[in-house]
Image (spheres, grey):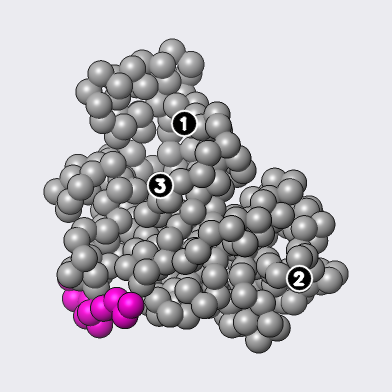
Amino acid sequence: MIGGIAAGIVVFNAEKERLENNISRLKKQVKDVYIFDNSNVSDGDYDGVTYLSENKNCGIAYALNRIMEQAKADGYKWLITMDQDSLIPDGMVHGFEESIRTHENIGIICPQVIDRRRTYLQAEDNEAEEYVNFCITSASCTSIEAWENCGKFDEWMFIDLVDNDFCKRITLSGYKILKLNKWILDQEFGKITPKSEWKQKFWVGVSKILHNQNFVKFSYKKSVSPLRVYYTNRNIIYVNKKLNKYGSIGYENYNCKGYLGFIISFMIPSILRAQDKKSVLKATIQGVCDGKRSKPGEWSAEI
C-alpha cells in the first residue's frame, strides 16, 4: 500500500543537506513527496519530489493547502505532513496504514511528539493508542476528505495556532484524531538553551509542587521572536472569535484555560524573557489590536 499515503514538507530557508536526508527517509516509506518552499528564493533542485513555490513566505496554512490539493489531484487520500527538520521514524507509515484499515472515522493519525531538549518531557513507554483532541501537523497523517469537509487550513492565520484551529474543526466535523504511542517523533519547538542541571531540577520540582507546568519554562533560556509573538497574540483572539460557539481553543498550548491565563503564562513571560523587549512589546500590542479588529466568519460544524 505504498501508494496509499503521500508526504508533504513545508520548508523555509532550509538547510539543504538536512532536508535531503529528510526526503531520503520519506522516500523509503512513501512513493510521492511534495515540497512547498516558503523561502523568498526558491531552490527546486531535489530529485524525485514535486516542488511548489511562490518565491515568498505564504505561511504554513497556505503551503499545507497547496500540498493537499496537489496530493488530491494525484489520487491520494492521505497525506503525512512534515517539518523540514523532522525525521520520520522507520516503519511509521506502515503503522499508520494498519490503523487506517482497522479504525473508522479517522481524520488524523499522529505519533507521540517529544522535544528531548526539554528534559522534563518524557515519552510514554507503551504501545497504546488513544483518541486525542489535538496534535501538531508535523508527522501527522491527515485524511484529505476530512481536510476538505472541515474547511481546510485557515490561511489568514499564517502560522501560529493553525494546528489548534484545524484539529478543533476536524473533531467537530465528526472525525477522530488517533495517537499511536508506539511511534515517537523528536521535534524541536523553538530556539531554546537548557540551563544548568540543578536549575532544571529546581524548576521542574517547583512545577510539580505547584501543579503548574509554566514554571518549567524557567529551566531553559528561550530566543523570543517578535514575529511569532505577534501571530500568537493575534491568532489566539481570532480563533476564539471564529469558534466561539464551541468553547475556548488554543489555551492548552500555554497550560491555561482562558485569556487571563494566557496573559500570565505567555504574554508577560514573552516580554520579560525577550532579548529585544521593545520589539516584543510592540509585537504584543500590535497582535492584540489586530486580533480584536479581525472579523472571522463564524464557523459551524456540518455533520
- Which amino acid lies under the numbered mark 2 shown in the image of this protein? Gly
Q: Quadrant of the C terminus?
A: bottom left
Given residues 176 and 117, the one toward you in this image is 176
Q: Residue 109, how many percent across, how many down?
A: 54, 57
Name the residue that disc number 3 marks. 224
Q: Quadrant of residue 264?
A: top left
**Picture quadrant of residue 294:** bottom left
Which one is closest to the eye, mark 1 or mark 2?
2
Mark 2 secondary-structure assignment: loop
Q: Give the camera-side residue of 115 and 56.
A: 115
Residue type at numbered disc 3: Val
* Separation of marks 1 and 3 at Cα, in angstroms: 21 Å
Q: Earlier in the sequence, mark 1 or mark 3?
A: 1
Q: Main secondary structure of the magenta part?
A: loop
**What residue is pinned by disc 2?**
3
On the rendered structure, is 107 left or right of 243?
A: right
* Image coords of residue 254 (percent x, y): 30, 45
Mark 1 Cα shell of 10 Å, populated few (<14), some (14-19), many (≥20): few
Tell me if residue 298 can be seen.
yes
Question: Quick check: 256 above or below 241?
Answer: above
Residue at the (49%, 54%) spot, across then down:
178
**What's the residue type where badge 1 is placed?**
Leu
The residue shown at (14%, 48%) is 260
Q: Residue at x 34, y 21 (%)?
A: 203
**How far is disc 3 from disc 2 in space, using C-alphas?**
41 Å
Q: Which residues are magenta?
A: 289-303
Q: Residue 121, which numbered label? A: 1
Q: Any magenta on residue 299? A: yes
Left/right placement of residue 263 relative to residue 135 reads left
**Front one among 28 and 12:** 28
Query: For residue 71: magenta?
Result: no
Task: State the quadrant of the N terminus.
Answer: bottom right
